Image (spheres, grey):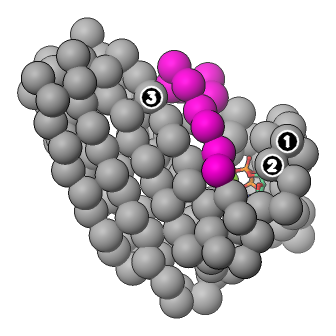
Amino acid sequence: MNNNMSLKFDARPENESFARSVVAAFCVSANPTVEIINDIKTAVSEAVTNCIVHGYENTMNGEILIEANMLSNVLKVKISDYGKGIINIEEALTDFYTTREEEERSGLGFTIMKSFMDSLEVESTPGSGTTVVLTKRLA
Ligand SMILES: Nc1ncnc2c1ncn2[C@@H]1O[C@H](COP(=O)(O)OP(=O)(O)O)[C@@H](O)[C@H]1O
Ligand SMILES: [Mg+2]
């Protein structure tokens, strides 16, 4: 099976919960375990939160695009913003690294995405945005 969907929504915190639920619902056809669904929800939630908080710096001014593909029970989900971008991706991926310490962010969002999914890739251009690509085998 090769199945695709895309979802575009405003970068507002109240949209984070339905966005992760949409990705979870998209996965149901592959019959994943509850544990796998929860891992995906957690990872998507971290990525969307990063777009809102870092990409658009909590301005609620901007859009987030989620594109998902399911091919032979492997989920690939791309989460993009058109915000600020990341200057040093390697540094951003370091455990506990955060640029918003004053808000008591853990700096573990990317670490969580990496450990809950099979792979994580980050593409970013400062000033034009960031795309996170997550993959996971569902069955
Ligand atoms: N979508 C994004 N746009 C801009 N910067 C980002 C984005 N996602 C992550 N970052 C940068 O990477 C850092 C690490 O992200 P993360 O591991 O989720 O930790 P946290 O969100 O707790 O700071 C962030 O502090 C931020 O500087
Ligand atoms: Mg984060």
Q: Which quadrant: the N terminus? A: top left
User: In the image, is residue 68 above or below residue 100?
Assistant: above
Circle 2 SS class: helix
> In the shown orientation, is residue 56 left or right of residue 4?
right
Q: Amino acid at mark 1?
A: Glu
The earlier-in-sequence mark between 2 and 3 is 2
Displayed quadrant of residue 120:
top right
User: In the image, is residue 75 above or below residue 81?
Assistant: above
> In the shown orientation, is residue 104 left or right of residue 116?
right
User: In the image, is residue 25 above or below residue 17?
Assistant: above
Displayed quadrant of residue 124:
bottom right
Residue at 46% x, 54% y: name it.
79
Report the residue that reaches farthest toward the top.
139
User: Does the segment drawn in magenta span residue 119?
Assistant: yes
Circle number at residue 90? 1
Q: Residues under labels 3 and 1: Cα distance? A: 19 Å
Nearer to the camera, 38 or 57: 57
Q: Amino acid at mark 2?
A: Ile
Instruction: Residue under label 3, please give it.
Output: 135
Residue bounds of the magenta highlight: 114-123
